[in-house]
Amino acid sequence: MDFAERKNVRTIAIASGKGGVGKTNITANLAIALSRLNKKVMILDADLGLSNIDVVLNIATKYNIDHLLSGEKQLEDLIVDGPQGIKILPASSGIQELTSLDEFQRLRLIEEIDSYNESIDYLLIDTSSGISENVSFFCMAAQEIMVITSAEPTAMTDAYALIKVLFTKYQEKNFRILVNNVKDSHEATDVYERLSTAADRFLSISLDYVGFVPRDDYVPKAVRQQRALIDMYPGSDAAIKIMEIAGEISKETNNNLKGTLQFFLGGLVKEKC
Ligand SMILES: Nc1ncnc2c1ncn2[C@@H]1O[C@H](COP(=O)(O)OP(=O)(O)OP(=O)(O)O)[C@@H](O)[C@H]1O
Ligand SMILES: [Mg+2]
């Protein structure tokens, strides 16, 4: 496959600050939704201490990033197939050392992922909660950062704190906001406007609104069944919204190249590989 085909991979980090606001569910379902739109998608489960993409989708994983970084396994050995042809690069659960990667491990990970030679259109990165070095690293290594928040004041405060840390430490100015688990579009835009006003006033940055996913009992139901919501309950309100958001995302092009160390799949390949 040639360079031109591979350099358009869009890398999106999904982050939140606060835990449990819906990152993993949105990542998994957005990946499947994009795949339904004929996009090739890979999920990087970057919740390195407590992975759960595999649990949400009931996927058995044999090896994980730990095996890759230790040199025991190759990237290809790790990747597993998920629903609708999506690929999943699993993290590990409960391996303490991976909750904080050192500089060398980060470089290795970027290098390994960059050398992946299957063509993909999207790399979605499901990050862990908190504002750890790892979370910042994955956000800065991605072209786009999608911040998930609910309407809870704690979720909003943590979303703002994440934005503030990435701005003050890395001068990041581009953030997209997805409001999850809200009653309706009014509640969602209210959350977005409040976040956006704070970011504008105190950091002088403007936030981009992606959309919202409503509170929907089918979400926890699908989680309990360990199946993707949009496969199990495609007619549910939340699934419909996720499909809509995927539709919007698939129409955009984004080549937001940053000054920092970034995932750039295929970027090192000059001609044919
Ligand atoms: N739109 C929604 N409607 C109803 N419940 C939801 C919705 N989104 C998420 N939830 C509930 O919140 C739970 C946590 O979601 P999820 O695991 O995706 O969050 P997370 O941000 O990845 O958490 P963590 O920070 O622990 O990784 C889900 O299991 C589900 O029960
Ligand atoms: Mg999660």
Image (spheres, grey):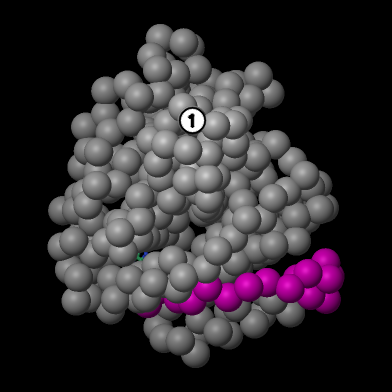
- Residue 80 to residue 22: above or below: above
- Residue 145 to residue 5: above or below: below
The part of the chain drawn in magenta is: 199-214
Task: Answer whether residue 132 is visible to the viewer in this image.
Answer: no
Residue labelled with disc 1: 272
Report whether the residue tagged 1 is closer than 8 Å to ligand 2.
no
Q: Secondary structure at mark 1?
A: loop
* Of the pair 162 and 245, the residue shown nearer to us: 245
Q: Position of residue 8 (x, y in %)?
A: 53, 50
**What residue lies at 32% left-to-right and 41% top-to-bottom?**
87
> Label 1 is placed on what type of residue?
Lys
Q: Position of residue 254 (x, y in %)?
A: 59, 60
Q: Quadrant of residue 206?
A: bottom right
Q: Quadrant of residue 25?
A: bottom left
Task: Answer whether residue 234 is visible to the viewer in this image.
Answer: yes
**What residue lies at 26% left-to-right and 29% top-to-bottom?**
61
Q: Position of residue 74 (x, y in %)?
A: 40, 17
